[in-house]
Amino acid sequence: MPSQYKDYFSSQAERYADIRPDYPSALIDFVAGLVRRHRLAWDCATGSGQAAIPLAAHFARVVATDASENQVAHARAHPRVEYVVATAESSGLTSGSVDLVTIAQALHWLDRDRFYAEVRRVLVPGGALAVWTYGDPSIEDDPAVDAALQRFNHETLGSYWPTGRGDVGEGYLRYEFPFVEVPTPRFRIEREWTLSDLARYARSWSSTVRYVSKHGTDPVVGFETELAAIWGDPETRHSVRWQITLRAGH
């Protein structure tokens, strides 16, 4: 497990805020329903606030933390969301004050033992932890476009994904989860994206950042050129889908 914060996202925080997908309302409704009291939620490793903002519809207050100061600087404002620069293992929250802890698409970056200890420290009796992740995107309505996307993801960038990223594809199912786990439904993210949207999303990946750092060139340029030949009108919107796996417990 990672022993310290590894920052793969500060350099493209603006891109991350611009294009990373939000989560389905049904998912947020489900995790909010795990607890009876709705005074305070902690959204850990919030990124740009993709989970924190909808949680604010259910909680009087949301504290959204991220170890990246640049990510927090680009997060979306909301009157009931307080953004704080803090690590997952040291939130700064008061013991026994939090009703629900959420962490989306980030558990694989953490020292999980220390994070779980922090969760137990801050949760109220009967409080809950909800952890979710989404796998690789797919283009459901065009096999040729999807094949190009999979080649770029797994072949061009395959060796540039940081260690631990493979656990995302497995939905964190191999991870220890020292809470009283509850059954959870399956969810998925659905977007209708143009060619430009998909390219912007690919540029927000940690693997793309590492590729650029090593080679000094943007791998998305070639990928976008390849897609342009098969996409059709660049303003045509194709269906992009991600399967979500959720684990939750008290």
Image (cartoon, rainbow, N blue to C red):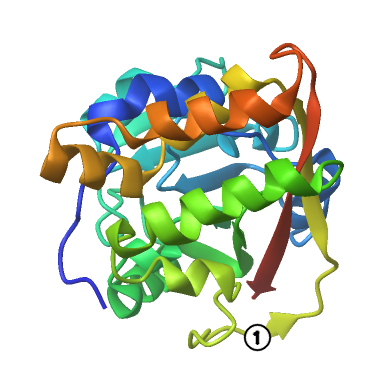
| Residue at point 50%, 25% (across, down) | 225
Q: Which residue is mark 1?
A: 180
| Residue at point 27%, 62% (across, down) | 89
Residue 33 in sight from this viewpoint: no
In the image shown, does 53 or 174 lie closer to the viewer?
Answer: 174
The amino acid type found where label 1 is placed reads Val
Depicted 30 relative to depicted 200: above or below:
below
| Residue at point 21%, 31% (across, down) | 217
Residue 20 in sight from this viewpoint: yes
Instruction: Quadrant for the C terminus, please.
Output: bottom right
In the image shown, does 220 or 197 lie closer to the viewer?
Answer: 220
In the image shown, does 158 or 11 lie closer to the viewer?
Answer: 158
Residue 192: percent from left, percent from top: 79, 27
Residue 49: percent from left, percent from top: 51, 31
Quick one: label 1, few (<14), some, or many (20+) residues within 10 Å?
few
Depicted 170 relative to depicted 135: above or below:
below
In the image shown, does 206 or 222 lie closer to the viewer?
Answer: 222
Q: Left or right? Give the position of 105 relative to 163.
A: right
Residue 221: percent from left, percent from top: 39, 26
Q: Left or right? Give the position of 117 relative to 125.
A: left
